[in-house]
Image: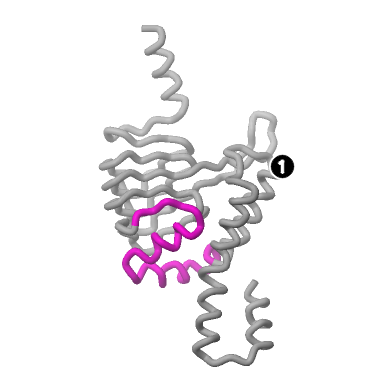
């Protein structure tokens, strides 16, 4: 990707200003534009997909578009220097992020098209928002687990926390520093619940 940019700049006779504009477009705008095109054609990858499925290949392609930012996180830190710019940039990828989100330094996002974050949310220093993971399923096959992370209005995500795929932090909740919120877990009224917990609670309610 960078090699193609260098080759393109070498073939063109342009000014420094034009080269700067091309560089910004190539690094920051072209990848999310291609991502939105892929999402428009293929849709979001399925929540569960084996590594040999078309859904996994779709996710893999989207991941390659983000690889430059995964390898060089300083590129995203530059965007966070300017209020609202990083949130708007995530919107280009397909996420729904309010411009009034506070992003602390060293936050890491693995899937930039799978976030929904409402206004006044605070994302703490070094937090990791990871809408995907790969784990072994019941058949012993490697399986991609994917889900949109949702963070409600005014929620506080502590430093060095890790939020997994499909997790939901309700408005006004606080996830303490260094804690984890697992796949499809929710944080509501200070209590973390998993899908299994919710199924058990539903079963008890039905029996009653």
Tell me: residue 176, above or below residue 159.
Answer: above
Q: Position of residue 60 (x, y in %)?
A: 65, 53
Q: How many neighbours does mark 1 have within 10 angstroms: few (below 14), some (14-19), or many (20 or more)?
A: few
Task: Report the front residue among 207 and 9.
Answer: 9
Where on the picture, by quarter, is residue 14?
bottom right
Q: In the shown orientation, is residue 174 left or right of residue 33? A: left
**Dominant secondary structure of the residues highlighted in magenta in the image:** helix
Q: In the shown orientation, is residue 203 left or right of residue 14? A: left
Q: Which residues are magenta?
A: 69-98
The total of numbered circles placed on residues is: 1
Task: Report the front residue among 197 and 151.
Answer: 151
Tell me: residue 41, above or below residue 204.
Answer: below
Q: Position of residue 35 (x, y in %)?
A: 58, 58
Q: Position of residue 51 (x, y in %)?
A: 70, 44
Q: Quadrant of the C terminus?
A: top left
Instruction: Look at the image and say whether residue 41 sits in the magenta stretch.
Output: no
Q: In the shown orientation, is residue 27 left or right of residue 59? A: left
Task: Report the front residue among 175 and 3.
Answer: 3
Q: Position of residue 18 (x, y in %)?
A: 53, 86
Q: Secondary structure at mark 1?
A: loop
Q: Residue at x 61, y 37 (%)?
A: 48
Q: Residue at x 65, y 71 (%)?
A: 1
Tell me: residue 199, above or below residue 156.
Answer: above
What color scheme is it? Answer: one colour
Identify the residue position indicated by label 1 in the image: 53
Q: Residue at x 45, y 49 (%)?
A: 115
Q: Residue furthest top?
A: 208
């Amino acid at each position: 990707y960078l090699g193609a940019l260098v080759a393109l700049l070498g073939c063109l006779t342009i000014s420094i200003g034009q080269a700067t504009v091309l560089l910004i477009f190539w690094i920051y705008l072209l990848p999310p534009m291609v991502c939105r095109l892929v999402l428009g054609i293929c849709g979001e990858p399925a929540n569960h997909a084996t590594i040999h499925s078309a859904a996994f290949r779709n996710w893999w392609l989207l991941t390659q578009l983000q690889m430059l930012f995964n390898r060089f996180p300083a590129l995203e830190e530059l965007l966070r220097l300017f209020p609202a710019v990083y949130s708007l940039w995530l919107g280009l990828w397909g996420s729904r992020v309010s411009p009034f989100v506070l992003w602390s330094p060293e936050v890491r996002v693995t899937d930039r098209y799978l976030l929904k974050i409402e206004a006044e949310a605070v994302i703490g220093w070094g937090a990791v928002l990871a809408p995907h993971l790969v784990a072994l399923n019941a058949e012993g096959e490697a399986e991609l687990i994917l889900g949109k992370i949702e963070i409600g209005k005014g929620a506080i995500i502590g430093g060095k926390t890790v939020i997994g795929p499909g997790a939901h932090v309700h408005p006004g909740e606080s996830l303490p520093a260094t804690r984890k919120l697992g796949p499809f877990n929710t944080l509501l009224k200070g209590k973390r619940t998993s899908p299994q917990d919710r199924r058990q609670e539903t079963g008890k309610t039905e029996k009653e």
